[in-house]
Image (cartoon, rainbow, N blue to C red):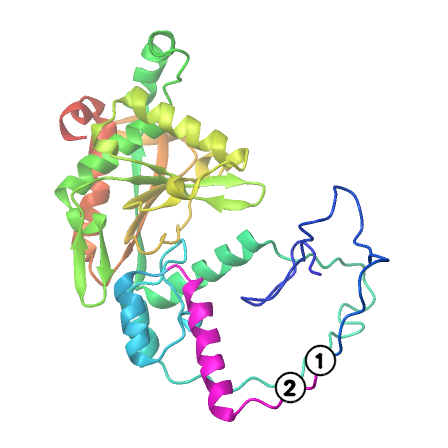
Amino acid sequence: MREAGDTVEIGEAIATIDENAKEGSAPAASEDSAPAKEEAPKAEAPKEEASNKAEESDSNDSEHVIASPAARKLAREKGINLNEIQARDPLGRVRKEDVEAHGQKPAAPAKENKQAEPKKDEFGGKPHERIKMSRRRQTIAKRLVDVQQESAMLTTFNEVDMSAVMDIRKRRKDAFQEEHDGTRLGFMSFFTKAVVGALKKYPLLNAEIQGNEIVKKDFYDIGMAVSTNDGLVVPVVRDAERLSFAGIEKEISDLGKKARDNKLALSDLQGGTFTITNGGVFGSLLSTPILNAPQVGILGMHTIQWRPVAIDQDRMENRPMMYLALSYDHRIVDGKEAVSFLVTVKKLLEEPEQLLLEG
């Protein structure tokens, strides 16, 4: 039988269950049971029957794949096994455009059965350790590579003066926490409101590409990248435009706790329209975040540093500054729109009273 972490084929038996056995008992042959009759050797099945069984097996395998009805219909018409299709959806759901894209790919060359043996002394005798990647880490690695290959990703940068936001938090954090049953006023609610306000002005950053169509979304489900011991996950704050600052902070807190406790449901991770990632909590000064496909935009926050800033031509002041990074899919988002989006986020954060109107 199979152990945890083993790779198995669809339809392969991984365990057997004896329905008549008692808990903790091992299966044993009954003394009174009659000896099993020897079965006559079966005649070899005709080739046509074997072919039908193979087709039935392929069909059963495909049934285990999560796919839209349109994708299943097209796959049947093209004679494509759904197991062979690479899904762009972060949860592995096969869509119609995935089947179309698969049909346009040239057939992959047959793989040789030979497995390259690892070098016996590839590190010159120096100590090292091999660790098998977890399923989550393998999925993350594959998706990140796929995004790099399938999108025209570009990143633009700006910086924001966090003085006004920090001043509001300093003045209001205690009253806010008391008024909202212990919910803390963090930075993420300000950034979420600013992102929603900017997305309303530049809706292509809240869209996705499906085949030859652009799907513009009039709702704002904002993904929040969360680092866990098993890797990065992106739970989603639903309908962020309808939530108050306290509502956003509570949602982020609840989702973060579920992520760290490994209790996120599939529904918590589905359907985000735009993502925010905060590398600043780890001290990152600048980075180029990778898109969370099929989304076409992701905002990267970074650590706040006090730096001298020219207020005017005659005056300098130390201000708490943060670099912002916006990665976007250049296939549908032009540079002008991306830069304007980021400037809008910057202005909303530097004049946070506008967030009540814009966000």
The answer to whether 280 appears left or right of 221 in the picture is right
Q: What residue type is labelled 1?
A: Glu
Looking at this view, is 232 or 166 the one in front? 232
Q: In the rendered structure, which segment of residues is drawn in magenta?
A: 40-66
Element assignment for label 1: loop
> Quadrant where the N terminus lies?
bottom right
Above or below, 270 relative to 101: above
Looking at this view, is 43 or 207 the one in front? 43
> Quadrant where the C terminus lies?
top left
Instruction: Point out residue 146 in the picture as x, y percentages from the top left corner.
Output: 41, 64
Inspect this view and state whether residue 314 appears: no
Quarter of the image for residue 255 reads: top left
Name the mark on residue 39: 1
Q: Magenta part mainly helix, strand or loop?
A: helix
Residue annotated with mark 2: 42
Inspect this view and state whether residue 294 appears: yes
Q: What residue type is labelled 2?
A: Lys
Instruction: Point out residue 240 in the picture as x, y percentages from the top left corner.
Output: 26, 32
Instruction: Point out residue 210 in the picture as x, y percentages from the top left corner.
Output: 23, 62
For the residues bearing labels 1 and 2, Cβ distance under 8 angstroms: yes
Instruction: Point out residue 56 in the picture as x, y percentages from the top left corner.
Output: 45, 76
- Please tell me which residue is depicted at 13% across the width and 26% down the height of the picture: 357
Quarter of the image for residue 335 reads: bottom left
Q: How far apart are marks 1 and 2 (CA)?
A: 8 Å
Q: Does the magenta stretch include residue 345?
A: no
- Please tell me which residue is depicted at 36% across the width and 24% down the height of the picture: 249
Above or below, 2 relative to 342: below
Element assignment for label 2: loop
- Please tell me which residue is depicted at 34% across the width and 67% down the height of the picture: 150
Above or below, 262 relative to 58: above
Q: Residues within 10 Å of mark 2 (few under 14, many from 20)?
A: few
